[in-house]
Image (cartoon, rainbow, N blue to C red):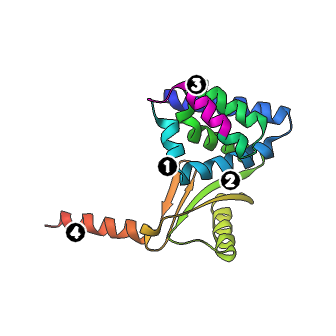
Amino acid sequence: MSESSGLTNRYAKALYELAAEKKIVSKIVKDFQDIKTLLENNDIFMNMIKSPAISKADKLSSISAILKRMKVDKLTIKFCGTLAVNGRLNYLKQIQDVFLSLVSKTNGEVQAEVTSSSKLDKDQQKKVETAISEATGVKKISLSLKVDETLIAGLIVKIGSKMIDSSIKTKLNRLEIAMRGTN
């Protein structure tokens, strides 16, 4: 186990225990989903978090202001503030993933990250959930959907540390590598 994974696990577990004690786990999950969307769609925010040139105090005031504007729970603001003060804000995404995984495990769910070449409609999402449910034997499936237009077609499904890649892009890359090997 690497130092960062132990660190992210400890922070995520501590947050989960606090949220469970205050009975606001679902609120923190919603907050983290909103923050995750912000991280994925805002390069400036992501750069601020990762930049060693920005002081811990500046990161603290910036993240607090952003989260207050997003109207997240006070616990989420305090938690992210603690990460900023301790110089751990760059682990936020990993901590979120571990936290959401803890919540899913506690609820008897399987968390699956699905990347597709285009946005999946409700019917397609149901088919993916059904396939994952049959493969894992778990009834409750929580999908995290992403779009990557470079995939051409197909899906990439990640469940924990396992990944199933049926994308055309990967198949073409494998074919290219195989063809290079025959020369």
Q: Residues within 10 Å of mark 3 (few under 14, many from 20)?
A: few
> Which element type, helix, strand or loop, lies under badge 2?
strand
Q: Is residue 137 visible?
A: no
Give me the residue at 32% from left, 65% from top.
Answer: 174
Residue located farthest toward the left when viewing the structure as drawn: 183
Q: Residue at x 52, y 35 (%)?
A: 90
Residue in view at x 49 percent, y 49 percent: 43
On screen, residue 48 above or below 42:
above
**134 or 53, which lies in front?**
53
Which mark identifies residue 179?
Answer: 4
The stretch of residues the image draws in magenta is 53-65
Q: Locate residue 131, reporting x and y percent.
A: 64, 68
Q: Secondary structure at mark 1?
A: helix
Q: Quadrant of residue 133?
A: bottom right
Q: CA distance from mark 1 to mark 4?
A: 37 Å
Towards the viewer: 31 or 43 = 43
Chain-order first, disc 1 or disc 4: 1
Q: Are marks 2 and 1 in contact (CB under 8 Å)?
A: no
Q: Nearer the viewer, residue 174 or 152?
A: 152
Q: CA distance from mark 2 to mark 1?
A: 29 Å
Please identify, in this view, whether the residue under mark 3 or under mark 2 is nearer the observer: 3
Mark 2 sits on what residue?
110
Local packing at callout 2 (Cα closer than 10 Å; few below 14, some 14-19, many 20+) is many
Q: Which residue is mark 3?
A: 57
